[in-house]
Amino acid sequence: MRGMVFQGDNKVELLNFDDPTPGPGEVVVEMKASGMCGSDLHFYRHGMAEVIKMLGFKDLASRGIDPDAPIIGGHEPCGVIAEVGAGVDAKTFKPGDRVMVFHYEGCTHCDHCRSGWTQLCDQGAAPHGVIKHGGHADYIKVPASSLVHLPSDLSFKGGAAVTCGTGTAYGALLRLDISARDTLAVFGLGPVGLSAVQLAAAMGVEVIGVDINAQRVANARNFGAAHVIDASKLDPVEEIHKLTRGKGVSCAMDCAGGEVPKQQAVRSTRVWGKIALVAVGGNLNVDGMKDLIGKQRTVIGSYTFSEVGMKDCAWFIADHGVEVDRLFTDEWKLDQAAQAYEDFNKQAGGKGVFLF
């Protein structure tokens, strides 16, 4: 089968791999859609080995992982079960089922794994597309326990969005315990930020979208933002306070990364405000007393979502008719991977996806 590998230095390579065979408790999924995530750009720019080191993954060899072997990229897999291994209950998963893949593997027995938060595994998680083969390939082999059925109302590319970017936005909204009584400022209107806008608007929340890219700012209105702010021209903290009668929003979310938007997210909230930090990159550099303690604000770190949360997100989208497919502005075939990532690296458009 074909599989795409990140080489670093803004290069990818399409290689040939053996077709996977499922072992006990495993399935092979024939890929139908594999999303491109902003975090993939770290691998694209710097290479797998460097980013794995930065993320702190250690002792890979002792876990049966060859740190020098080429790893297929992509951690937003969605497709159809092609083959099941021994011990997989046919009443639960069988060939032909449409499925999404929760892209982390863990020890399966620690409290985090048992509760669906495999990325927090006590023994160290093994993410697909990072240290295990990912979805930018014709097939992917995964534990049956990592699968979630794809609702019939969702397309394969919609399911791919849910497996990381859109699911991450949903997970952050849950962490904020948000409701229609709230106002939400979303800083950074890339695919995750736009997902947050879409989902929060569907929940009845008044959403303010903030970005420094004029095109993304304009686009946010089409995704349900009640107000938009071009932070390259206006101070978003001042503008948010104007829109909220001087109080600030009840909730904010940083989907941009970097020190400045994190500061702005904190300072845009009212007394008792809640801030979810989603984007990787940049430290939170604020005045402890003035910005946090004295305002009774709560800062929440939100790291993707649980497997149950991924399922809930998919059904929320299906039940509320959220048009998640609109996040995708570019569709590619796998043999176009070099051009696809060259374009995606410009970070000027929306979300990209490989369709099979």
Image (tube, rainbow, N blue to C red):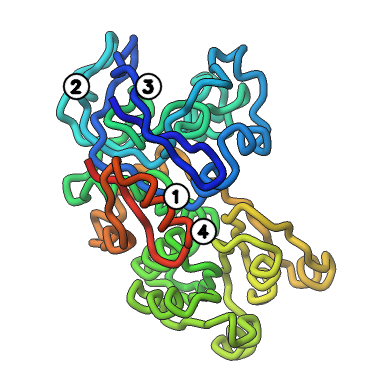
277 vs 130, left or right, is right
Instruction: Give the residue type that dot 3 points to.
Output: Pro
Q: Mark 1: which secondary structure?
A: loop
Three-letter residue code for mark 1: Cys
Amino acid found under the numbered disc labelled 4: Asp
Spatial CA span between label 3 and label 4: 31 Å
On-image quarter of the C terminus? top left
| Distance from the alpha carbon under mark 1 to that under mark 3 | 22 Å
Q: Residue 281 at x, y = what percent?
A: 65, 54
The CA span between labels 4 and 2 is: 34 Å
Residue 298 x/y as whole percent: 68, 61
Can you tell which mark lies on residue 91? Answer: 2
Q: Nearer the viewer, mark 3 or mark 2?
A: 3
Q: Quadrant of residue 15?
A: top left
Are the residues tagged 1 and 3 within 8 Å (C-beta)?
no
Label 3, label 2: how many angstroms apart (C-alpha)?
A: 16 Å
Compared with 304, 172 (above or below) is below
Q: Closer to the N terminus: mark 4 or mark 1?
A: 1
> How packed is label 3: few (under 14 Cα within 10 Å), some, or many (20 or more)?
many
**Quadrant hosting residue 282:** bottom right
Residue on which disc 1 sits: 37
Residue 143 numbered tag: 3
Viewer-proximal residue, 6 or 251? 6
